Image (spheres, coloured by chain):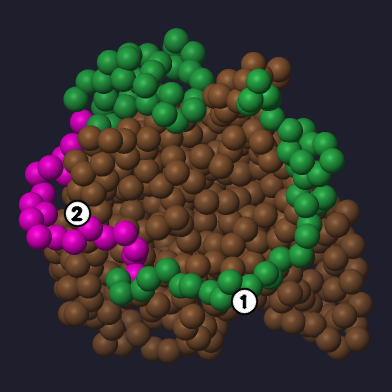
Amino acid sequence: MSALHLRTLTQLADGLRRRSFSSVELVADLLARIEKSQPSLNAFISVTGSEALEAARAADRTLAAGGGGPLTGVPIAHKDIFCTEGVRTTCGSRMLDNFVSPYDATVVARLRQAGAVMLGKTNMDEFAMGSSNETSFYGPVRNPWNPQLVPGGSSGGSAAAVAARLVPAATATDTGGSIRQPAALCGITGMKPTYGRVSRYGMIAFASSLDQGGTLSASAADAALLLREMAGFDPRDSTSVDTPVPDYVAALEEPIAGLRIGLLAEFFDKGLDADNERCVREGLRVLEGLGAKVRPVSLPNLPMSVPVYYVVAPAEASSNLARYDGVRFGHRCEKPRDLNDMYRRSRGEGFGAEVKRRIMTGTYVLSAGYYDAYYLKAQRVRALINADFIRAFESVDVLIGPTTPTPAFPIGAKTSDPITMYLNDIYTIGANLAGLPAISVPCGFVGGLPVGLQIVGPHFSEPRVLTVAHAFQRATDWHSQVPKGYA
Amino acid sequence: MALTREQIASIATLARLELTAEEVSLYQESLSSILEFVGALERTDTTEVTPMAHPLPGLTQRLRADEVTEGDRHERYQQNAPSTAAGLYLVPKVIE
């Protein structure tokens, strides 16, 4: 059997149950890896080592007594957007640098309930606004495949940590691609569930009609194992959907012969790197080899996804981030002259450049005289994009395309032009606008860098999306590749 | 469309953001290019299309009974506050 850090979440949960090794042994091993990686990767904002070892000891006692849940003793990390009781929760921002959450996010509570042990909080783009992890107040995260390159974002810390095998899996969030894009750029599996499937309670809000929590892991089987614990109705989230959670793990082994795959014509555009395209098309052939039938599908309004997103998301963000006023929590400026001065300077100092840009954009598109032209117009085009997806799913079971236009790019390469950065999410935003489940799985390498293939399904089709991804991963070994120096 | 420095200053006032002179220039340039980029939406015909505010069509915000479910945890919550006294949040004087 391979070294502990190279085993998947599923293998680790199994090994712990059999007591082949202890949770303390595993946690100590991974904490040492995290510490060693931190100067080069910067994947973590906070490491909760002593709490983790204490939780691991408790898990070992539970396992020794023959008890335990599905994840007892299994180490994970949480994106620093999820509130963790008694632990600093920064959202990658100076604004929350000193914020210690007084409660747990539902996702955090559920995973703890299932027995998972948190090792720390991962780095991220500030308030999840970014596609490269360069907007973090705590500095950029580096890509384990090449430290000169970005890991993607906004869940760049979670993605780098899983890719470098510092943790077997981590939580993440996806508003426009923030799970799938870093998964693709780091060569791992990233699952964004249906909007409303995973509770957003205690998950710091960015754009509330788009935000959804999910997973970053080595494999689709691991994503299924985690999601089974994370998903489900939560009365504390008014957008949480009250439908039963299927057994995602049990569904994994279903055959995919006869599966109807729609090839997203709009995703094979001029922006798609030729080598990326080659990898994705080879991936499709693998699925055809397993009995799937591929046919082209056109979603004519999909190219409008990015413009729709860059109206809707900043608008919702400007409203959500109005809560950071320097009064009850978060950064407050020194010696405010009056209340308005306190608001303006606390926010001016507490937020970084990209967050301020989005707040400004959102404020403008919601302001009197522009609301109809921008915000309402974007919501109408969003309805058309959604209708395109619904129509497509009348004739196919899943849609497949690339996750990103290119592999990972150099740190600093796209920071000067926001539009260039925004276009990284051109293939991922559609699923957020329509609230659909989508997964990115590794499907090859270009110049030593991983490439992602994206599978999108209808609302609440997580079992199908995970099954297709799992079938692909049983036929390929791209997802088992580990960057040099981290094996 | 190009925004003026005055427009940027007025948006910043609405958003309660103090900006430096360099930031005003930065956002003048980038907001103008973002607005030009999202201006592409105009080309889509949306006559008689109902705006979509919720990604799961047909689902609306759930209501709950108006019952107290949280205990009094103000002391815990106020540990994160920049300034408090006697259980209250302190801010600069609002009324002379």
Tell me the tag on residue A381.
Answer: 2
> In this picture, which residue range is highlighted in magenta?
B36-56
* Callout 1: chain: A
Q: Is residue B41 magenta?
A: yes
Crowdedness of circle 2 by 10 Å Cα count: few (<14), some, many (20+)? many
| Residue under label 1 | A229
Whether A102 is drawn above or below A191: the answer is: above
In this view, the residue in front, A147 or A190, is A190
At label 1, the amino acid type is Glu
Q: Indicate whether residue B53 is drawn in magenta.
A: yes
Color used for chain A?
A: brown
Vertical side of A195 occupied by A160: above or below: above
Please provide percent x and percent y for residue A448.
Answer: 46, 46
Q: Would residue A137 appear left or right of A312 to someone viewing this image?
A: right
The one of A146 and A200 positioned closer to us in this rendering: A200
Q: Residue at x 23, y 76 (%)?
A: A393
* Residue A48 on image: x %, y %: 80, 51
Of mark 2 and mark 1, the one earlier in the sequence is: 1
Q: Main secondary structure of the magenta part?
A: loop
Q: Residues within 10 Å of mark 1 (few under 14, many from 20)?
A: many
**Callouts 2 and 1 in the same chain:** yes
Specify the chain shown as green. Answer: B
Is residue B42 visible in the rendered image? The answer is: yes
Q: Position of residue A8 (x, y in %)?
A: 64, 69
Task: Work out which quarter of the rendered image holds the N terminus of chain A and state it.
Answer: bottom right
Q: Are marks 2 and 1 in contact (CB under 8 Å)?
A: no
Residue B36 placement: quadrant:
top left
Secondary structure at badge 1 equals helix
Question: Going 42% across and 62% down the picture, which residue do you hit?
Answer: A440
- Total labels: the figure holds 2
